[in-house]
Amino acid sequence: MITYWQQDDGQFFKTKKDEINSKKPLWIDARNVTRDETNQLQEEYDLEQDHMLDILDPDELSRMEEGEGYILTIVRVPVYDPAAETPYFAVPVGIIIKGRTIITICWTDCEILKDFGNNRIKNIKLTDFPSFIVQIMNRANLNFLRYLKEINRRSTSIQNEMRMEIENQEIMLMLGLEKSLVYFSTSLKSNALLLQKMKSTKLIKFDDEDIDFVEGVAIDNRQAIEMADTYTDILFGVMDAFSSVTSNNLNIVMKKLAIINLVMMAPTFVTSFFGMNFKLPFETMPGYWAVIMATILCIISVFLSVWLLNINKEKVEARKRARKLSRKQRQKIRHETRKLKKQEKKLK
């Protein structure tokens, strides 16, 4: 979808292609683009095909280079898609400056560009294209930080569930969060290299105010990189700890099975020994003796099964009690925080 934007009194407004004011700078927002739309932009603004393919490549890294009559900048921005296998990932956004027109191209929907169109970001001047690019990178850093905090909260909640009982679904969710952190770390480091290039490039002229802004964005970028690396190390350590717990539980189960196997070896040995042309001690007794022995064995097996079921029930009930206690503790904490907030409001 291609949308045309122009600015009036610091506010963006949509315009139709036939109603574009040639005296004002133009922003072309192309998101969820199709092949026909990319071909249209390529032919209309004389863009190179290799650059268009690089923008639409999901694994393309951030960079800045010069084309024939325009300047291309690729920035990695975060995206959240709850329906995807990896909910948090990063995509490239191509920013093309040609004359008095700036074009942003993204193969999927982008929350950052949506915020620009909805006038949620202040102090944006469409007449200053270098500042526009730095604003996109600044907004990308803020979204990276916000998504990193959400990933940390989700991993903490999954860890609390895994302490009760480890299931395959929870492990897959943790693996998805690990992938997201790796994608974020790679994209942030790629953006850091682009910010370093912006300070020394001659392709785009940055004034002193823009250079100071780039310095601030670089600081936020370094903070996001450190946060992503920290969360990645923590998550890897947690997964290693849970894998050790799983292997320990498996060893306990195998130990129990080995004990049962050893116990069952004795009657197996006895029955196999007496089954080979050997006179049994109860052969001369009446036929109902076999029925008595069978009933005794059935009673013993029933008692053993009941005993084992009671043990399993006690374990299940203990887990349920632990879950209820954790829920009650969470509710108490929430209730106390609400009380504290009310007291703070009264004091203010």
Image (tube, rainbow, N blue to C red):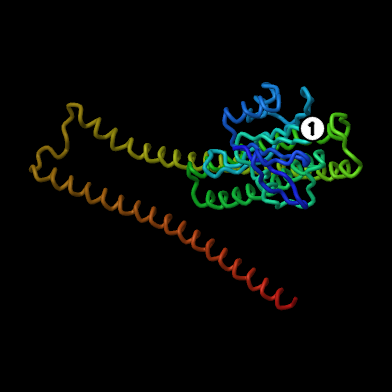
Res 47 quadrant in image: top right
Check the image and name the residue furthest to the left.
286
Q: Is residue 169 left or right of residue 217?
A: left
The reply, left or right, for residue 97 in relation to residue 54 is: right
Quarter location, residue 277: top left
Instruction: Decide which of 36, 331 is in the foreground and name it.
Output: 36
Q: Secondary structure at mark 1?
A: loop
Please, is residue 305 above or below residue 56 in the view? below
Quarter placement of the N terminus:
top right
Q: Is residue 153 above or below residue 287?
A: below
| Percent x, y of residue 333 | 61, 66
Instruction: State the image coordinates of residue 52 (x, y, percent, origin top left).
Output: 66, 26
Work out which quarter of the rendered image holds the C terminus and state it. Answer: bottom right
Q: Nearer the viewer, residue 330 or 45?
A: 45
Residue most extreme to the right: 208
- Residue type (three-letter) at the residue carrying disc 1: Gly
Which residue is depicted at the point 56% across and 49% down? 158
The residue positioned 44% from the left and 38% from the top of the image is 254
User: In the rendered image, which residue does mark 1 sit on?
Assistant: 99
> In the rendering, at what x and y percent does residue 129 appear?
80, 39
Tell me the quarter of the picture where residue 273 sits. Answer: top left
Percent from the top left, x then y, of residue 41? 65, 29
Does any portion of residue 244 appear in the rendered image? no
- Residue at 48% over, 44% down: 167
Residue 77 visible, this orientation: yes
What crowding class fits label 1: few (fewer than 14 Cα within 10 Å), some (14-19), or many (20 or more)? few
Q: Residue at x 52, y 42 (%)?
A: 83
Q: Is residue 54 above or below residue 102?
A: above
